[in-house]
Amino acid sequence: MPGGLLLPSGGAVAGRSAAALYGAGTVTAGDPVEVVIPRHVRFGRSVGLLAHSADLVDGDTRELDGMRLTTPARTCWDLAQWLDLVEAVVVIDLLVRRRLVTVADLEAYAARRRGVRGWRRLLRAATLADAGAESPQESRLRVRLVLAGLPAPVTQYVIECDGRFVARVDLAWPEHKVAVEYDGLWHAAEDQIHRDRQRLNHLVNAGWVVLHITSKRLREDFDTFASDLKTALRARS
């Protein structure tokens, strides 16, 4: 058990903690360990644990290095119940990207639990998941754009011109030749700015419109950015 904590009877490490053990995402030393406990099991509060009471069905748990935790599919189910939609998809993207679970697996899991409270939440999260996401911020950006009414983009799209490689962009709408790039802090380096501007010139010459967004704008001015993107897509229709 992480941190030497005792797992309650019948319980399993779950949610973000289980995802982190699978190598999908991280938790800090100060974060409580998320666990799921069968509803019929009585347990008291324990320092360092964040316990959720829920039904566990056959096949929902497995052993990993001597520790009981939820399977990747069940982990995604719990993430869809316990987190808001955007943050749930952020972690699900990581699990899908690591090939621990597929979107089809999640759709099948939701279908098997059709009628159980929460099955639609998992199905919605599965519909938004994308193995192409290369960072949590890219996942947040993509999901928020779709929830804002924009068509789903193609992730990590390779752009070519006359059969020659031009660039690989974070998000793309190929039929409109519109792309979105998320600029992290590493883009601030002088050499990187030079390379980015050269790359942008190549994209423009290939007929593409490229919109850039930073973490600050994603956090503070997302609605305006989404509006700008909608305008660009309409102009290219």
Image: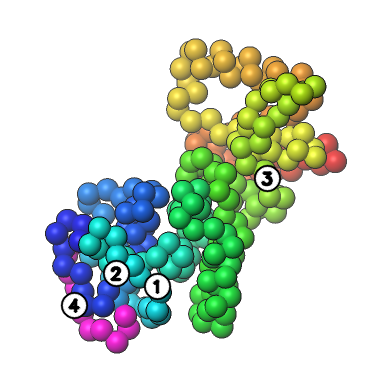
Number of other residues with Cα within 10 Å of mark 4, as a class: few under 14, some 14 to 19, many 20 or more:
few
Could you tell me residue 108's position as x and y percent? 57, 70
- Look at the picture and state if 75 lies above or below 133: below
- The disc at residue 60 is 1
Could you tell me residue 162's position as x and y percent? 80, 22
Of the numbered discs 2 and 1, the one sitting upstream in the chain is 2
In the rendered structure, which segment of residues is drawn in magenta? Answer: 38-48
Q: Is residue 82 visible?
A: no
Q: Which residue, given by chain and number where applicable, does mark 4 sit on?
A: 44
Mark 1 and mark 3: Cα distance apart in space = 32 Å
Of the numbered discs 1 and 3, the one sitting upstream in the chain is 1
Q: Are marks 3 and 4 in contact (CB under 8 Å)?
A: no
Q: Are marks 2 and 3 in contact (CB under 8 Å)?
A: no
Could you tell me residue 109's position as x and y percent? 53, 71
- The disc at residue 127 is none
Q: Are marks 2 and 1 in contact (CB under 8 Å)?
A: yes
Q: Which residue, given by chain and number where applicable, does mark 3 sit on?
A: 153
Dot 2 falls on a residue whose secondary structure is strand
Amino acid type of the residue tagged 2 in the rendering: Ala
